[in-house]
Image (cartoon, rainbow, N blue to C red):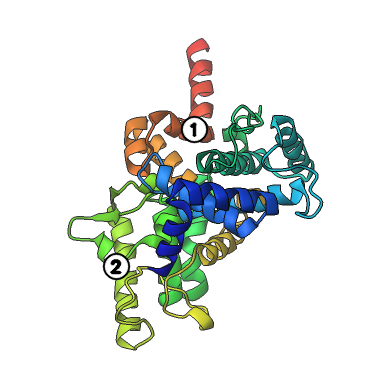
Amino acid sequence: MGTELVLHSRWAAPENRRREALRAAHGQDAATLCELLDYHLRLKSRRAGEVSPATLRAYTLAVRDFLAFVGPPEAPRHALTQLDAEAIERYLIGVRDRGLELSSVRTYLYGVRALFRALVWAGARRDDPARDVRAPHDATPAHTKKRAVPPAQLGRLLALPVERHGEDETGLRDLTILTLGATLGLRAGEIVGLDVGDVDLTLGEVHVRRGKGGKARRVPVPRAGAGVLARWLRSREALRVRGQVREDEPALLVSFRPSHFGTRLSVRGLREIVNGYLAGAGLPRDMFGVHTLRRTAGTRLYRATRDLHVVADILGHANIATSAIYAKLDTDIRREALERVEDTEG
């Protein structure tokens, strides 16, 4: 409640908003500028305030990085209230020169754009210098860089948790993680955000209450996946009975780190677990990441159905065009097409 009152009093009234924004811009007060950015995103979001924590973290990082480029408050190279589009373009060149991936460079630009939209809204600037700055284009097709786990290695990946830990709580939890990612196609935040009550094995579905953009969806669970979830739920219940998971902890997946034992697993913890198994399956480092599991699920779905509408529905894509990448990710589909050409011409 206290934080809400501070935000309300600082940004709600136009005269206070402009004064505070100008003070923060002139002093390059990173904390206040990020607070303004947060408030503006929540207030003006196209989805009525539904801004993901990951987006807020990424934009905050971008703003702080941009302020470092602008220069120290006592002797800035650029003034936030006066700099133009060329300064932002030079900043992006510098970011690219650091060796960041183009997707990261685009995220930095989106964060800077969000900052200047907030400054214009607050009355600290009349124009938005970032509005017409174009994001760098990557000529390399996404499907050649972002690969899915091949079928031969997927079986190995899914066998690793039980091979390493047996059917104990760690093995069952980790197999559940891999199943939620590589079978159901859940995103990292969706996986760790699940509560026990979101799993309904009677109906055979998982309720994702807050997907990307705040959208909810119900994902059907196949028989094998339901078996994995059932075994983990029994193991988690045993942890609760032993007092290792608190009665009021709703999270489906919990951490086993000594300092956080029995509390909701974090995205960082999830990433470490998944990357450990991806490495164990012999996959290269450029395939590490929880999203590799989601790409694998999308590719498997398309291979089984050849129906992008089904892929979009299960994965929670707002636009079917987003799902088209999974058709391109499946090298077997392209190989089969070439073989059919040979058979036809032969």
- List the residue tagged with mark 1: 325
Q: Quadrant of residue 77?
A: top right
SS state under label 1? helix
Q: Which amino acid does label 2 sit on?
A: Val
SS state under label 2? helix
User: Looking at the picture, how far across and down is residue 190, in whole percent?
Assistant: 40, 55
The Cα–Cα distance between marks 2 and 1, rounded to whole angstroms, is 32 Å
How packed mark 1 is, by other alpha carbons closer than 10 Å (few <14, some 14-19, many 20 or more), is: some
Q: Which of 193 and 126 is in front in this view?
A: 126
Name, please, the residue furthest toward the front: 15
User: Looking at the picture, how far across and down is residue 40, in whole percent?
Assistant: 47, 47
Q: Earlier in the sequence, mark 2 or mark 1?
A: 2
Please give the name of the residue rendered at 70% of the width and 32% of the height, measured from the top-left corner: 84
Please give the name of the residue rendered at 36% of the width and 48% of the height, measured from the top-left corner: 214
- Vertical arrangement, residue 154 with respect to residue 238, above or below: above
- Vertical arrangement, residue 21 with respect to residue 338, above or below: below
How packed mark 2 is, by other alpha carbons closer than 10 Å (few <14, some 14-19, many 20 or more), is: some
Please give the name of the residue rendered at 57% of the width and 64% of the height, measured from the top-left corner: 272
Q: What residue type is labelled 1?
A: Ile
Q: Residue 302, labelled with which disc?
A: none
Please give the name of the residue rendered at 18% of the width and 55% of the height, measured from the top-left corner: 203
Q: Is residue 293 visible?
A: no
- List the residue tagged with mark 2: 196
**Direction from residue 103 to residue 76 in the image, left or right:** right
Single out the mark in the foreground, 2 or 1. 2
Q: Which of 130 and 228 is in front in this view?
A: 130
Q: Is residue 156 visible?
A: yes
User: Looking at the picture, how far across and down is residue 147, in whole percent?
Assistant: 57, 41
CB within 8 Å, label 2 to label 1: no
User: Looking at the picture, how far across and down is residue 204, in whole percent?
Assistant: 22, 55
Name, please, the residue furthest toward the left: 202
